[in-house]
Image (cartoon, rainbow, N blue to C red):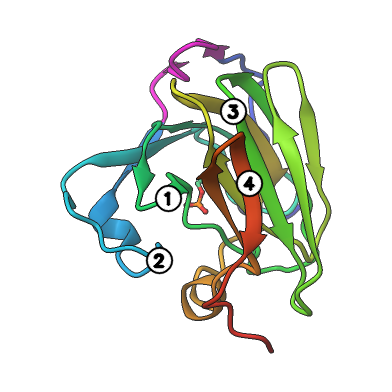
Amino acid sequence: MSDALLEPFSVTIDFGTGALVPDPDVLARRLADLDGYFLADITDPEVGAYTVHEVRVPKTGNNLLSSTTVLEPGKVGDEYFFTKGHFHANRDRAEIYLTLSGEGVLVMALDDGRTVTKEMRPGVANYVPGHWAHRSVNTGTTPLVFYAVYIGDAGYDYATIAERGFPVIVVEGNDGPQVQPNPRYVTS
Ligand code: S6P
Ligand code: ZN
């Protein structure tokens, strides 16, 4: 057996705030943690960008990890606040995002630059297949809150996105959010 036998359990999720009960592991990211990710310079690095609240479960391939992410509204230059974005370290591991509140765009990209964007709004479940890097963008005026479920040994590869960026950016246009080519994207 590759893992200890777990007791069944339940978690309560506040759809508005993303808060979990019982107490999860919480990770807080400030704009300072996103230094170099936006085209424009960050003027206030201490501003909170997002928090991740992860249910405590062993990170093994026979478990399902889950978390809520609370992504604040805001912009750096013309770009809406976003999560760092990552490939899974085990690239073929899939994931589901269920949006609980707010609105946004889920940007997904393959190594070869192929890109798909999907709307995030309450009640929509987005399926992120293995091999697709993923980043959430808050295009609204309230926190974007979503619940993610992923295979326990998915892990994180942040370095590839930090070095290459995503092929597209999401900016505020005259008629709302626009997806545009990222002039700084580094092709493989
Ligand atoms: C984990 C899943 C999410 C993100 C979270 C923050 O596989 O995709 O829980 O970790 O939305 O994004 P990031 O890119 O900073 O990990
Ligand atoms: Zn992920």
Q: Is residue 4 visible?
A: no
For ligand 1, tell me if the residue under mark 4 lies within 8 Å: no
Between discs 1 and 3, the one toward the N terminus? 1
Instruction: Give the distance between the C-alpha atoms of the residues marked 2 and 1, in whole angstroms.
Output: 9 Å
Q: Which residue is mark 1?
A: 78
Mark 1 and mark 2 in contact (Cβ < 8 Å)?
yes
Instruction: Say what secondary structure mark 4 lies in.
Output: strand
- Mark 1 or mark 3: which is in front? 1
Residue at label 3?
Answer: 146
Q: Nearer the viewer, mark 4 or mark 3?
A: 4
Q: Which one is in front in this view, the residue at disc 2 or the one at disc 3?
A: 2
| Badge number at residue 178 | 4
Q: Earlier in the sequence, mark 4 or mark 3?
A: 3
Which stretch did the figure color magenta? 12-24
* Beta carbon of the mark 3 residue lies under 8 A of ligand 1: yes
Circles 4 and 1 in contact, beta carbons < 8 Å:
no
Q: Main secondary structure of the magenta part?
A: loop
Q: Residue at x 61, y 14 (%)?
A: 10
From mark 4 to mark 1, how far is it between C-alphas? 10 Å
